[in-house]
Image (cartoon, rainbow, N blue to C red):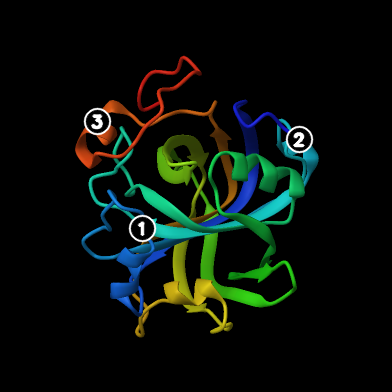
Amino acid sequence: MLDPAAPQLVINARTLLFSWLPADPGVVETLLPAGLRPHPQRQVFVNQYVVDDETQTSGFGAYSLTYLGVSLADMDPPDGGTPGGWWTHYFSSSERVRRYAAARGAPAAAGETRLDLRGDRLTAETRAGDGTLLIRVTARVGHTGTEVHNGHHRYLTGRGGELIVTDYPYVAEPVSPFEVESVEFPAPEHPVHALRPANPLHVCWGFYSPRVSFAYPARPNVPDEVSDRHQVPARRARSGLPSGS
C-alpha cells in the first residue's frame, strides 16, 4: 500500500472535466457535510480520466478514474479558477489508487472509465465495479494548440471527523473547439443518479485534454481561512506544509 501522506505525480492523462446544473438542485445541499455550503448555482462536476501506462505515474501505475461532486461556495483555490468541490463519488479501476485515496478521505469504490475518441467525437463512459453503466458523456472536440491551462483545483474530503482540504496543482493542454453534447445517467437505482443534469443541459465550464499532468500533494490540512470561516473541526498538519498548500 502506498503511504497516503506521500505525494504522487501523474502526467499526460487523457481528461474530460466539466460542470453542469443538476436536475434536482435541492438534493445537492443534502450531500454536503455540516459547515460547507453549495455554490449558489448548485453546480455539479465530473472528472473522467485515463492513465494509459505505468510510466505516467510516480507510483499509481496505469489506471482509470471518475470522480463527481458538488461545487462549493467560498472555497476557491488560492489562485482562483474553478470553484472548490466536495467529492461525493470516486470510482477507480486500481485497488492501489482506491486505498491511497480512501486513506485521504475519498469515497473510493471500484469502477472503470473509458474515453473513446473517433474523429471529433469523444465518448466517455464510467461503469461501477459490477459493470453497471453509470455515466455516458458525448462531446465534440478539436485539437490542442498553443493554449495551456495551469493552476490548482481544490477538493475536500472528510475522514474520522477531520475535514481535509487539498489543492491539486495541474497543467493541461485543452482542445478547441470543445462542446459537451449529452450527459446520461442510465442507472436510476444507483446513488450517483442524484447528480444527473437538468434538461436542457446547461454546462457551466469545462475542457477536454489529451495531456493533463497533476499531483496529489503531501497530505495537507484545513487552511486557517477555511477553518475560521466554516467552523469545522480540524487536526493540525504534521507534514510541515504551509496552510493552503
Mark 2 touches mark 1? (CB < 8 Å): no
Residue 212 percent coordinates (x, y): 57, 44
Residue 74 percent coordinates (x, y): 23, 45
Dot 3 falls on a residue whose secondary structure is: helix
Which of the image's four quarters has the C terminus? top left
Q: Earlier in the sequence, mark 2 or mark 1?
A: 2
Residue 133 percent coordinates (x, y): 66, 77
For the residues labelled 2 and 1, the Cα–Cα distance comes to 29 Å
The image quarter containing residue 48 is: bottom right
Question: Left or right: 96 with respect to 40?
Answer: right
**Label 3 is placed on what type of residue?**
Glu
Tell me which residue sits at (69%, 54%) in the image: 64
Residue bearing mark 2: 1
Q: Earlier in the sequence, mark 3 or mark 2?
A: 2
Which of the image's four quarters has the N terminus? top right
Residue bearing mark 3: 225
Q: Nearer the viewer, residue 37 or 208?
A: 37
Q: Is residue 54 above or below residue 197?
A: above
Q: Which mark, by number, is residue 32?
A: 1
Decide: few, some or many residues near mark 1? Use Cα within 10 Å; few <14, some 14-19, many ≥20.
some
For the residues labelled 3 and 2, the Cα–Cα distance comes to 33 Å
The image quarter containing residue 40 is: bottom left
Tell me which residue sits at (43%, 35%) in the image: 167
Q: Nearer the viewer, residue 218 or 160?
A: 160
Tell me which residue sits at (54%, 84%) in the image: 188
**Label 1 is placed on what type of residue?**
Leu
Dot 2 falls on a residue whose secondary structure is: loop
Question: Left or right: 21 with respect to 120?
Answer: left
Answer yes or no: is residue 207 visible. yes
